[in-house]
């Protein structure tokens, strides 16, 4: 099974991945709506790079009480018409990469916008053991 | 005859990401431009070259034993 | 939409924040960034105001591509009347403040008046708040950003250090610790308003017609036109790359511009910086990541950039990279522009060595060199003199001929005697000696054009100035070398109207003229467009530029020709016909 993997040592913190994701999936450039979270900044403890991506752990599929999130052929999909906006998936995503929207949620559908845009291959789709 | 070439900055990718290489040349006929052609470095990617620390034209004829540095083009700035 | 159509205006004297529509006609004629901020200041500032009085305004201006996925579009223009020069002043700062301001719903913020007590401004969408900065005042720029990180969740900040509070003409504004709106005392304008910091967070986004197609087009452009040989030096090396090029061509300022080569350049060049590099860092939406986060010994900084290496290293006769890194960090933390600071220290060193005035510091004196940022920012001891800038230091103690500044703004790291067009670029830059208005060294010293002739140089400089002016309106980073055709292509998509290279050329010319008109109104003309005497009268002695100077009569000819091309008279004043042509 393939999932999105983040390589912090290669990341330059440009946020192009988040812009690409929000454009593709939400129709606007807005990094906060992206289905991955990358931060790269200086803190008191030094230079800090962090990435949260969907690692295809499928906790959301399990927790959704109405089966609005389903896995099919190694991809997740979201059925808005079933969603009751309970936000259980959002609250329980260990990587906090499910975006709560006014209606429904945004989830990584492996569209590869982020990996296509990443200029340094800091984001890749790789085989992961599940 | 031998010359030593140093490729700076992004030009290293034309030499497997290493900056130093030694090239064998025919003395008296080979220009630096010829060397760049052999390495497939586009002239447009080069600011200028130096031979033994002096800026020279690409048509400089190599005699052998020189140290040539190829500086990348820096267009914005 | 390329524009939010809204401007946030904050009056610090009354504490009131208001919003108003963006002036659409001006946005059409000046795009954004540099041009639009200058236009607002030209219209709103009365002539002759004191730049450090409540009458000055600080404009934070985004551009039509800000917040989008257009490569290298993350910059913000920060503009005001300059306390260092009395000219118009626009700086550009990277990081991610600009997109955040737009996401909060504003094309620009205009800050006016003066707060009675130190404050900082917090903008979160339509919530605008002034908070007491009593606990931040006096703190370093870095500590200030850390404290704001603790108080505010996920905001982007711009702050000043003690240099800005103490109104130094070389005070800068910092963001994300190591990004600066550096020049002309822009930080002192903020300090004069008792404004320590601006924090912004926006929940909105930017929409563009056919956004998926637009993204795909931009990704293609990024691959084929941004991440290419001519730009990737930024990623592979960053600006330290330039050290070797300047050394070889004899234009690396050394010991206060006494020479154009530095014997120990290998200790401060790109290889030396790369050897201590820990990470690469980019501004928002930039695939080139010119930033180098370095650590050497106990010293750490994002930098040092070429300008810092030139002015604070070779120009001060300092070859110890660890010391330069520490000096760089101190300047950033105290909120000092490294170009002007390096010049002030180098000037003091030469004055001391020549016995003209004893500042107690000589070329290569690391111990005293590292004390200077604190002394300057706090105006203590000799620092009180250095904090005046080289022009005023020279007026006080002599050495005018080697006070390396134009219009009071200290000179960047390219020796004009080895790149004559660079001399003209310094002389005619709208904000004093600046390397970003035009950078002809790329084609003269580093290219095929003879650096030691005035032939066709006026045209070269004007063309580069106009192109860069346009680029800084969009607002794109200087480091992406892209054609006006490409800018027109991108803007046509972003603005959803046809943009042409002809219109872009007119915009560049218009922006350069409105900046000139601002300066003209302040009394500037030909007499102010000259370089320090050293450039005209002293020959360089080493390397590729040995024996070279820029003959004054050649400079005069170049300047006259430049005015003619601009449509200005021989005294450098904009002719009525030109004003008419540009609708000014």
Image: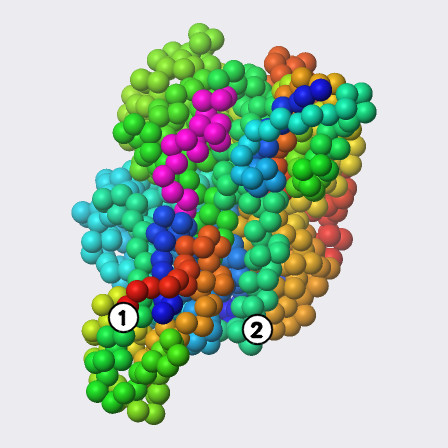
Of the 4 image quadrants, the one containing the C terminus of chain C is bottom right
How packed is label 1: few (under 14 Cα within 10 Å), some, or many (20 or more)?
some
User: What residue appears at the point 67 percent right and 40 percent down from the top-left corner?
Assistant: B41
Q: Residue at x 27, y 74 (%)?
A: A58
Separation (CA) of disc 2 from disc 1: 31 Å
Name the side, left or right, on which C450 lies relative to C286. right
SS for callout 1: loop
Q: What is the x, y in percent for residue C367?
A: 31, 17
- Front: mark 2 or 1: 1
Q: Secondary structure at mark 2?
A: helix
What chain does mark 1 sit on?
A
Q: Position of residue C285 (x, y in %)?
A: 47, 57
| Relative to C441, C111 lies left or right | left
Foreground of the two, C572 or C380:
C380
Q: Nearer the viewer, residue C205 or A7?
A: A7
Read off the magenta span.
C265-281
Mark drawn on residue C213: 2
Tell me what residue is drawn at x 27 percent, y 43 percent.
Answer: A46
Q: What residue is drawn where x is 29% and y is 77%? A: A100
In front: C22, or C139? C139
Q: Which residue is mark 1?
A: A57
Give the vertical position of C538 relative to C10 (above or below): above
* Quadrant of the rendered image containing residue C108: bottom left
- Mark yes or no: residue C379 visible: no
Residue lying at the far right in this picture: please name it.
B29
**Disc 2 sits on a residue from what chain?**
C
Up/down of A69 relative to C95, above or below = below
Q: Position of residue C122 (x, y in %)?
A: 29, 60
């Amino acid at each position: 099974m393939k999932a999105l993997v983040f390589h912090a040592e290669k990341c330059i913190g440009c946020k192009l991945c988040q812009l690409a994701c929000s454009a593709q999936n939400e129709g606007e450039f807005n990094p906060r709506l992206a289905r991955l979270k990358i931060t790269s900044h200086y803190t008191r403890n030094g230079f800090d790079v962090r990435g949260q991506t969907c690692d295809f752990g499928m906790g959301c599929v399990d927790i959704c009480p109405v089966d609005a999130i389903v896995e099919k052929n190694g991809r997740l999909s979201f059925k808005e018409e079933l969603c009751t906006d309970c936000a259980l998936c959002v609250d329980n995503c260990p990587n906090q990469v499910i975006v709560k929207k006014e209606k429904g949620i945004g989830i990584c559908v492996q569209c590869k916008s982020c990996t296509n845009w990443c200029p340094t291959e800091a984001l890749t789709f790789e085989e992961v053991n599940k | 005859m031998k010359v030593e070439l140093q490729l700076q900055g992004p030009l290293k990718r034309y030499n497997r990401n290493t900056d130093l290489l030694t090239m064998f040349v025919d003395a008296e006929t080979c220009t630096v431009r010829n060397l760049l052609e052999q390495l497939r470095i586009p002239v447009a990617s080069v600011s200028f070259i130096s031979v033994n620390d002096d800026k020279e034209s690409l048509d400089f004829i190599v005699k052998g034993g020189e140290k040539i540095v190829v500086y990348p083009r820096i267009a914005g700035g | 939409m390329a524009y939010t159509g809204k401007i946030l205006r904050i009056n610090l004297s009354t504490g009131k924040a208001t919003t108003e529509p963006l002036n659409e006609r001006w946005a059409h004629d000046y795009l954004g960034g540099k041009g639009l901020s200058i236009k607002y200041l030209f219209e709103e500032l009365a002539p002759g105001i004191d730049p450090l009085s409540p009458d000055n305004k600080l404009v934070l201006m985004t551009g039509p591509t800000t917040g989008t996925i257009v490569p290298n579009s993350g910059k913000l223009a920060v503009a005001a009347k300059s306390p260092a020069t009395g000219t118009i002043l626009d700086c550009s700062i990277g990081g991610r403040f600009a997109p955040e301001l737009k996401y909060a719903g504003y094309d620009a913020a205009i800050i006016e008046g003066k707060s009675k007590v130190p404050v900082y401004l917090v903008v979160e969408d339509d919530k605008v708040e002034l908070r007491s900065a009593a606990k931040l005042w006096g703190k370093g720029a870095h500590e200030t950003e850390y404290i704001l990180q603790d108080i505010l969740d996920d905001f982007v900040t711009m702050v000043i250090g003690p240099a800005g509070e103490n109104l130094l003409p070389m005070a800068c504004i910092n963001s994300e610790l190591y990004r600066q709106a550096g020049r002309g005392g822009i930080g002192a304008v903020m300090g004069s308003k008792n404004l320590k910091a601006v924090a912004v967070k926006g929940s909105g986004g930017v929409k563009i017609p056919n956004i998926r197609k637009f993204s795909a087009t931009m990704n293609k452009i990024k691959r084929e036109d941004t991440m290419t040989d001519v730009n990737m030096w930024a990623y592979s090396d960053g600006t330290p790359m330039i050290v070797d090029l300047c050394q070889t061509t004899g234009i690396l300022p050394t010991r206060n511009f006494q020479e154009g080569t530095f014997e120990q350049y290998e200790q401060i060049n790109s290889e030396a910086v790369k050897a201590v590099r820990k990470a690469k860092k980019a501004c928002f939406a930039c695939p080139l990541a010119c930033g180098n986060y370095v650590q050497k010994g106990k010293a750490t900084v994002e930098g040092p950039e070429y300008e810092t290496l030139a002015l604070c290293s070779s120009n001060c006769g300092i070859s110890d990279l660890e010391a330069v890194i520490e000096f760089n960090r101190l300047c950033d933390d105290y909120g000092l522009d490294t170009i002007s600071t390096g010049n002030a220290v180098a000037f003091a060193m030469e004055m001391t060595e020549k016995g003209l005035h004893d500042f107690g510091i000589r070329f290569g004196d690391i111990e005293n060199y590292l004390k200077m940022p604190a002394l300057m920012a706090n105006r203590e001891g000799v620092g009180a003199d250095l904090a005046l800038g080289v022009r005023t230091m020279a007026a006080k103690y002599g050495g005018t001929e080697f006070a390396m500044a134009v219009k009071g703004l200290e000179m960047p790291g390219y020796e004009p005697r080895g790149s004559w067009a660079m001399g003209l670029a310094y002389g005619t830059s709208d904000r004093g000696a600046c390397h970003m208005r035009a950078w002809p060294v790329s084609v003269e010293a580093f290219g095929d054009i003879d650096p030691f002739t005035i032939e066709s140089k006026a045209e070269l400089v004007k063309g580069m100035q106009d192109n860069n002016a346009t680029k800084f309106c969009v607002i794109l980073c200087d480091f992406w070398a892209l054609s006006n055709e490409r800018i027109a292509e991108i803007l046509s998509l972003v603005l959803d109207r046809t943009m042409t290279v002809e219109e872009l050329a007119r915009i560049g010319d218009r922006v350069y003229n409105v900046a000139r008109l601002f300066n003209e109104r302040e009394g500037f003309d030909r007499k102010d467009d000259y370089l320090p005497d050293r450039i005209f009268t002293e020959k360089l002695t080493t390397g590729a530029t040995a024996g070279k100077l820029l003959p004054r009569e050649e400079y005069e000819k170049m300047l006259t020709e430049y005015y003619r091309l601009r449509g200005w008279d021989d005294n450098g004043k904009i002719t009525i016909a030109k004003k008419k042509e540009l609708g000014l």
